Image: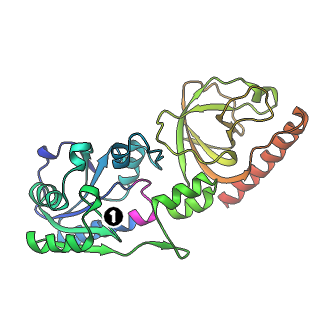
Amino acid sequence: MQVIHDLNSFIAPEIAIVTQGTFDGVHAGHREILGNIVDIARQKGGKSILVTFHPHPRHVLYKTENNLKLLTTFDEKVELLSDTGIDYLIVLPFDENFSKMEAHQFIRDIMVNHLGVNTMVVGYDHRFGRNREGSFEDLKEYAHMFGFEVIEIAAHDIEHATVSSTKIRHSLLEGDVETAALFLGRSYSLSGTVIHGRKMGKDLGYPTANLHIANDDKLIPANGIYAVKVEHNKKMYGGMMSIGNNPTIQGAKWSIEVHIFDFDLDIYGQDLKITFVKKMRNEEKYSDIGLLMKQLKADEIEAKAILSKKED
């Protein structure tokens, strides 16, 4: 997959099969659309193209009131898209001027004049252009006007629920990482850099790596205790993660901490990738440290059982 940041330097293929959207999360519904454009490009002897935007349009249009958290950072999205088989990812810089482009202008200037679109594939209820004014019916008119084909892909359903990035975000904010994984088609993950903490975990017999998530827009699942997989230097480990305020520890602040099973390396300043498997419980305040240590042992046993079952 070639990533194109300068549309003016892009040489359009003779047969361009195109789709367009933010594709945050690259979830199961997104991959169905992308699979279609890859198949159509193969059948027609053309090239598949995804046109996306950076930053996310809502971060530009609603700067002062927007608290949208993203399922994927830009780099994560590119990595996931690279596995879908599409030929080109075209990244359009989204700013206030771009947001004012009317629907017909977007189709004419971007899709037709720059990309020479042969076939445009869109998802159910696709909207485009200024204020999302362009509908599928409009798109069919433009297709007739400019001489390209348009195909609408039905909504992708899993267990009778339509997949959407919004529903996945809601699941994660509720701590339901298993439903999120079902909709995503993979377990949710985040990456962070190990920083120094208060080192209370070591005193409790469960040393933890405190994580700093560099991208403020990355969605962090709900507070709680999770069974997780941890990737360090391309090696996978089991672990249990705490997200929250550590209510039993006096003076503790909100943090993201992971205890990695069977691991004893100095990794300060290094990066970890965390994959969420299951939320085990909410965070709780215990009357003394002894009860907390007892609960941590129970959490370890449960997390190992969950991870072991997951591998079977």
* Residue at mark 1: 34
Q: Where residue 253 sits in the image (x, y, percent)?
A: 68, 29
Q: Residue at x 26, y 69 (%)?
A: 135
Is 62 on the left-hand or right-hand side of 211?
left
* Residue closer to the observer: 222 or 137: 137
Q: Where residue 110 sits in the image (x, y, percent)?
A: 15, 55
Q: Is residue 28 magenta?
A: yes
Residue 290, by quadrant, is top right
Residue 254 vertical placement versus 178 (above, below): above
Residue 191 vertical placement versus 136 (above, below): above
Is 247 on the left-hand or right-hand side of 123?
right
- The type of colouring in the image is rainbow
Q: Quadrant of the C terminus?
A: bottom right
Q: Where residue 277 sits in the image (x, y, percent)?
A: 64, 53
Please provide the residue range marked out in magenta.
24-30
Q: Is residue 234 magenta?
A: no
Is 61 on the left-hand or right-hand side of 27?
left
Three-letter amino acid code at disc 1? Leu
* Residue closer to the observer: 64 or 169: 64
Q: Residue at x 39, y 49 (%)?
A: 77
Q: Residue at x 81, y 34 (%)?
A: 248
* Farthest front residue in view: 65
